[in-house]
Amino acid sequence: MAKFYGIGTGPGDSSLLTIKAVETLQNLDILYTPEAKKGGESLALSIVGKYLPDKLEIKSRHFPMSFNDGEKIVAWNKVADEIVADVKEGKNVGFVTLGDPMIYSTYVYIMERLIGSIDVETIPGISSFSNIASNQNFPLVMDKEPLIIIPCTIDEEKIDYALENYSSIVLMKVYKNFKEIVSKLEKNDLIDYAILVSNSSQDGEVVYNDLRDINLEDKISYFSTILVNKEIKKTVKVG
Amino acid sequence: MAKFYGIGTGPGDSSLLTIKAVETLQNLDILYTPEAKKGGESLALSIVGKYLPDKLEIKSRHFPMSFNDGEKIVAWNKVADEIVADVKEGKNVGFVTLGDPMIYSTYVYIMERLIGSIDVETIPGISSFSNIASNQNFPLVMDKEPLIIIPCTIDEEKIDYALENYSSIVLMKVYKNFKEIVSKLEKNDLIDYAILVSNSSQDGEVVYNDLRDINLEDKISYFSTILVNKEIKKTVKVG
């Protein structure tokens, strides 16, 4: 029976696709890909490119990054309707999404609109923070500690609480308030337990094993993540 | 040059290995596998079994689950010494570990002992909570929310704080204090936003979309995880 597959592509390197993702891609009739800009390239599509079957129909769809919720909802509804129609016509339909589909992914808004109408299977992917941690041989969390993942776009007091109370912390989207974050890390004696990675597994990857080496006046990339682990001494990448 | 590879196998299903993990396995000379009981089967080994090259030498090593740190340290040191010797002899050596190597994995204690002596490359894997979330079409976290992952073996007040203050929560190892956890979820009006999965992707997988359906007097499996997401209405698995 025809089905819809939401496929996590992982963080950027095609070899971090799972076997299941590749096998699923090879049995698709139609693949929907999200593009942030109209006519722009889809990073998710470039990751899966080499594993796509010849006969595949690719349907690029624009997902507005707008702050206007109404505009987004119209776009999601339209794509969801198209997908339902395709699956009901007997096509196996896929949708690719960066990282893991269940962690900070717009995919969820499509998925929610499909469940109940058609069969939906979601295939997990390697999340960006897992990839960064492994690449740097940086243990995210051990034993009895909690792990907290924080988009730095949240309220400042929530960031403060986390830095004061947890040992294992992933700080995502640190680009906007980077200076403030570094000063918070210093205040909480976490600076020696932190690393920063920008554009992980992509062109222009930058790694700072010591956040003190960064010029705080420089702009840092939108795709920048800080990992903190107070329990484990920083290990130097040897690889 | 010969190298050591720490390879995340993902949660249990061989098809959730990454392409990179499979390619790495196929180029190994020696694979170390952890066994919890002497002579016991390694789950990590069974996951990678079908992808191993014919000429591979498998070295099963016992990792004591003891609370005696001294005993563990002796075991880790011994395995690390063996691995260093093998790599220095020019062998490509691997070590397989369940889930993701940087998230609650004993692998880290081996890795720490190797860095500085030999080249170490870690390959990320799908974590158990990512897999559970995708399998159940259950969004872990969206937008500006933090995601907190908590082993329920930590202090009770830390569990309480998380349940009172976060919307997106993964509760791992809920077997011991399961009754208390369910009552905490009820107290915080989270019970309608929670699912429980035991033995995910293994024989004997059990899923509860409604935690009220569970007999609180029954023992639940050691490998039980509760996912909570207060922001997103529970979606029913249709797959």
Image (cartoon, coloured by chain):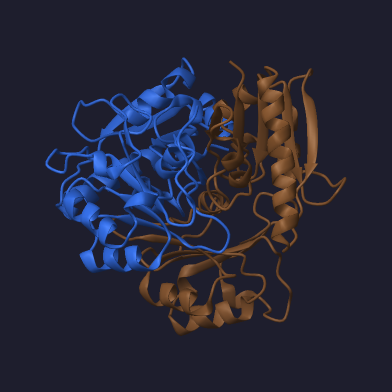
Chain colours: A brown, B blue
Say which of A18 and A116 sits in front: A116
Which residue of the protein is positioned furthest toward the right in this rendering? A39
On screen, residue B177 above or below A230: above
Which residue of the protein is positioned furthest toward the left in this rendering? B217
Residue B81 falls in image quadrant: top left
Residue at x-position 22% and y-position 37%: B221
Residue at x-position 76% and y-position 38%: A46
Residue A100 in the image: state x and y as whole percent: 56, 44
Q: Is residue B116 visible?
A: yes
On screen, residue A153 above or below A90: below
Quick check: A2 left or right of B85? right
Question: Split into 4 quadrants, where in the image is the N terminus of chain A?
Answer: top right
Residue A195 in the image: state x and y as whole percent: 54, 66
Residue A175 in the image: state x and y as whole percent: 66, 70
Residue at x-position 15% and y-position 39%: B219
Q: Is residue B104 visible?
A: no
Quick check: B206 left or right of B100? left
Say which of B67 and B130 sits in front: B130
Quick check: B220 left or right of A217? left
Residue B19 in the image: state x and y as whole percent: 58, 30
Residue B155 falls in image quadrant: bottom left
Total number of numbered discs in the rendering:
0
